[in-house]
Image (tube, coloured by chain):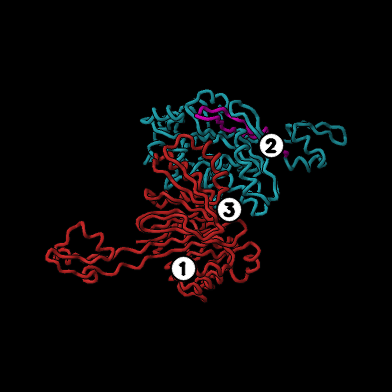
Chain colours: A red, B cyan
Amino acid sequence: MNNITILGCGSAKPTRTNTPSSQVVEMCDKQFLVDVGEGAQITMRQMGLRTNRLDHIFISHLHGDHCFGLLGLLSTWGMLGRTRSITIHAFHDLQKLLKPLLDYFCQAMDYEVRFHDINPASHEVIYQDRTLTVSSLPLKHRVPCCGFLFEERQRLRHIKKDMIDLYDIPLARIPEIKEEADFVCSDGRVIENQYLTTEPKEPQRYAYCSDTAYNERLIPWIEGVDCLYHEATYTQEQEASAKQYMHSTARQAAQIAKMANVGKLIIGHISARIKDQALSLREAQQVFANTILAQDKTCYQI
Amino acid sequence: MNNITILGCGSAKPTRTNTPSSQVVEMCDKQFLVDVGEGAQITMRQMGLRTNRLDHIFISHLHGDHCFGLLGLLSTWGMLGRTRSITIHAFHDLQKLLKPLLDYFCQAMDYEVRFHDINPASHEVIYQDRTLTVSSLPLKHRVPCCGFLFEERQRLRHIKKDMIDLYDIPLARIPEIKEEADFVCSDGRVIENQYLTTEPKEPQRYAYCSDTAYNERLIPWIEGVDCLYHEATYTQEQEASAKQYMHSTARQAAQIAKMANVGKLIIGHISARIKDQALSLREAQQVFANTILAQDKTCYQI
């Protein structure tokens, strides 16, 4: 099951209930870490979250509340005996800043930290494998910043087990049948693919957009995603602050969700100034009903 | 009341219950932060701890679990509008490592971060004011490392209120009387200080010793302190690990406490490998009965 686990969904200043931004995205049986605010590794440990399928970290931008937890996590993995390399996809300044710290604090690690410099200003594929792709989503913020779009690739068709038996289909033929080939029986009969297979599930798509000012440019890229995580730092009343600091209001997040026709919206990154987060949720739901208010240490299906 | 508030008393790897090392020492109405492991600022916020009397931070050594929370804390103080400077007392490498990060992440702060380079190999006064001194305590660890000894200075004598009335003592005379001066009445009579004042309370002393191998050299420096916080990373069974990694066992911490004749011992920095910390506590108490097992988010009187 594809899902996201919110480690932290707070804004810049931690509060009693929210720690800085970090989430684990699980798709196609792989794990990806998106942003690593301070305390992410502590929350992982408190939740008993295993990260043995996590080989890629995506950093949206270089504000502290999105990356100050990186060094601690990398260091702890070293102590735990990690051997598989980790790739950090981020704006190039991160490598310059993190390298001297890794050299000083993490000298005896048995795994490699690889940096993949990304261009936050461009919408492009930054990771892909056989089952999914991850693309950058240029955001509007005070520093170079991008969101991330996780997309399952077209799944293979499901082959019906009883047809395998009925036509005595050899195992070697199954991959091509899953890719829509017909099957030719030993007596020459051609069985059309439509009788052998069923439609695969629709590939799922998840978009992470934090931090950003109201940004309609996102809409075509995230059109119809199953789940959108969008920052909602302020409420409508604080729209001037949203403009000044290049963040969104809950209402603006919902407007993007509505215009992009997404399946569901999760709002987070609520400012510490907002004492009652239910206000943000109500504001968003007035525009886009299927909105959820993110909580730390909580798992959501995509 | 002098006390210490443990923000984190874990070892290198965070566990479900323990975050990395950090504690707030309150003495003489001032606050001092000792070590700043990752998440210290988050715990402060969760505890609702105000740090408006905190102007000095002491870093024992440059292992991540003792300093990875610094940058986040300094950054958050900037966002909260702090204006009073902060002084970080630490081994000189810290300045070199932290400066580029402060320059990048904390550009628009209204307060100054000052670095006071200390020599962890030397037992010397590194901070003093009218009411207390803080000295370094050379420890034995894998990198340059020192503990910290907080000592109230000799307190002033208490002047008896009824004597002020009886001899009509002007306010201007009171400070010198508190410092043991006699009082000369207008008619020339000399009232000896012993009739005017009572003994001040004994000055309190607190020692923080983490991380360190068993180190008898500490004993004369911490002799008779009211409270000793000493690391107890391992149990007796793991004495070889303690030796290898230059840490102490719970028993060794208690031996130091006993030989130094301290008032009470608080043990912390328990390894994540130890599943039942009560074992560490029992081991220490067998040698030194007045031992407490440190807990995160807990305040202890000195």
What amino acid is found at the position of numbered circle 2 in the picture?
A: Thr
Per the image, label 1 sits on a secondary structure element best described as strand
Vertical arrangement, residue A184 with respect to residue A77, above or below? below
**Residue A41 relative to residue A14: left or right:** left
Numbered disc 3: secondary structure: loop
Q: Are marks 1 and 2 in contact (CB under 8 Å)?
A: no
Residue at 51 percent of width and 65 percent of height: A230
B82 w.r.t. A236: above or below? above
Q: Quadrant of residue A131?
A: bottom left
Of tags 3 and 1, the one toward the viewer is 3
| Residue marked by disc 2 | B131
Report whether B25 appears left or right of B174.
Answer: left
What range is drawn magenta here? B131-159
Instruction: Give the residue number, with chain letter if any, for mark 3.
Output: A63
Q: Residue furthest left?
A: A187
Disc 1 marks which residue? A292
Q: Quadrant of residue B239?
A: top left
